[in-house]
Amino acid sequence: MNKLVLGLVLLVLITSGCLDSDTDYPEEFEQADVGVLVGEMHFQQEGMEADEIEAALGDEIVFYNEGSVEHTVTIPELDVDEIIEPEETVKVEASEELDDALVDCTLHGGHDAELTVE
Ligand SMILES: [Cu+2]
């Protein structure tokens, strides 16, 4: 009986440890003015609809690839075109006002979003 309890406690400890590391985002993502998760076919800003990104002028936008394949962060109007590897971040400064500017992943058709900076 005691062995069973010990086993269960260990299982809970191991499982919760794994869950913690799954939800651990990089510090630069957590501390960004605007954080955007990049995954298979989406750009997701917390609290926003999928594929809609909003920032204030001068904000630092940090994209974090939570998926398992590489994508790009391509914003023609800001002259940004960078590959983002899994578990890597790309930082973009919202340096000018934009109205629904294209944020594209050039590796996947249909993987894009709209960025508004005001
Ligand atoms: Cu993509």
Image (spheres, rainbow, N blue to C red):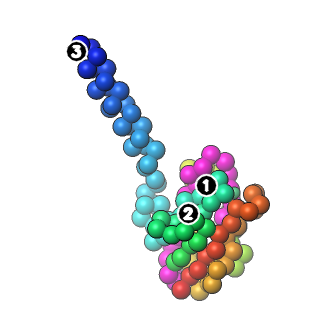
Residue 68 image offset from top left, x and y in percent: 62, 46
Mark 2 close to ligand 1, CB under 8 Å: no
The answer to which of marks 1 and 2 sits earlier in the sequence is 1
| Start-end of magenta stretch | 56-73
Residue 40 image offset from top left, x and y in percent: 65, 53
103 to the left or right of 87:
right
- Judging by the rendered image, the residue that carries numbered circle 1 is 39
Residue 61 image offset from top left, x and y in percent: 53, 70
Q: Quadrant of ligand 1?
A: bottom right
- Judging by the rendered image, the residue that carries numbered circle 2 is 44
User: Residue at the location (56% across, 78% down)?
Assistant: 94
In the image, is residue 57 part of the stretch drawn in magenta? yes
Mark 1: few, some, or many residues within 10 Å (few <14, many ≥20)? some
- Judging by the rendered image, the residue that carries numbered circle 3 is 2
Question: Which label belongs to residue 73?
Answer: none
| C-alpha gap between disc 2 and disc 3 | 46 Å
Q: Observer-nearest residue: 82 or 14?
A: 14
Task: State if disc 2 and disc 1 touch (CB < 8 Å).
Answer: yes
